Image (tube, rainbow, N blue to C red):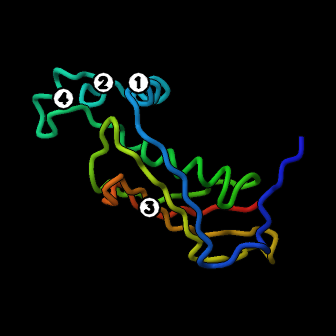
């Protein structure tokens, strides 16, 4: 199997990529299972109806997981090690929302005499109304 690994030299500040997905009930249940976060706001319709949201809210980390997928497959892609992240959840995400994650390279730098190659990437997730639901910044090493 041929896998094209990310090449630090090929990236430039301003490079961007996106990925989109519509959130389903199945996504929320599977995410609850893998994360062990069964907060009733996420998984219980009756409870969620009693909250200010009036319906179930997806896990905040579910929206960020699109960013993780984007980093690992597209920008930068295979051969990337996620080192750190800063993250803010701005708006709730609901079943049926279509999310688009965007990653943009904002800085390139090296450490240890060029042996460690880093990219700083701004990340945003918007919903189908182009409302910002998640924003952040990640630092990755290109292996």
Looking at the image, do the residues carrying marks 4 and 3 touch, with CB atoms under 8 Å apart? Answer: no
Are the residues tagged 4 and 2 within 8 Å (C-beta)? no
Q: Residue 18, relative to residue 58: is it above or below? A: below
Taking depth in this image into account, of 86 and 131 the one nearest to the observer is 131
Between marks 4 and 1, how big is the CA–CA gap? 14 Å
State which quadrant residue 106 falls in. bottom right
> Which residue is rendered at x = 72% and y = 75% of the image?
110
Which quadrant is home to the C terminus? bottom right
Residue at 25% x, 25% y: name it: 40
Residue for badge 1: 29
Screen quadrant of the N terminus? top right
* Residue at the image point whose x is 29% and y is 56% from the top: 90
Specify whether 130 is left or right of 142.
left
Q: Which residue is disc 4 drawn over?
A: 48
Q: Earlier in the sequence, mark 4 or mark 2?
A: 2
- Which is nearer the N-term, disc 4 or disc 3? 4
Quick one: label 2 or label 3, which is nearer the N terminus?
2
Percent position (x, y) of residue 84?
55, 58
Q: CA distance from mark 2 to mark 3?
A: 25 Å
SS at circle 3: strand
Image coordinates of residue 61 in percent, x first then y, are: 42, 43
Residue 52: x and y, percent? 11, 40
Measure the C-alpha gap from mark 3 to mark 1.
24 Å
Reading the image, the residue beneath label 3 is 124
97 up-or-down from 86: above or below: above
Is the residue marked by circle 2 packed among few (<14), some (14-19), or many (20+) residues within 10 Å?
many
Q: How many marks?
A: 4
- On residue 43, the disc is 2
Q: Secondary structure at mark 1?
A: helix
Instruction: Tell me the SS state at disc 4.
Output: helix
* 118 sits left or right of 123 in the view: right
């Amino acid at each position: 199997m041929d896998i094209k690994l990310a090449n630090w030299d090929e990236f430039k500040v301003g490079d961007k990529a996106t990925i989109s997905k519509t959130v389903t009930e199945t996504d929320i249940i599977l995410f609850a299972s893998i994360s062990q976060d069964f907060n009733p706001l996420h998984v219980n319709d009756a409870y969620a109806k009693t909250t200010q949201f009036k319906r179930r809210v997806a896990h905040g980390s579910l929206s960020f997981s699109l960013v993780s997928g984007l980093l690992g497959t597209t920008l930068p892609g295979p051969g990337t090690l996620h080192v750190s992240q800063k993250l803010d959840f701005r708006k709730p995400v609901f079943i049926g929302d279509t999310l688009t994650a965007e990653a943009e390279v904002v800085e390139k730098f090296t450490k240890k005499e060029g042996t460690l190659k880093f990219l700083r990437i701004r990340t945003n997730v918007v919903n189908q109304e182009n409302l910002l639901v998640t924003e952040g910044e990640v630092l990755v090493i290109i292996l």
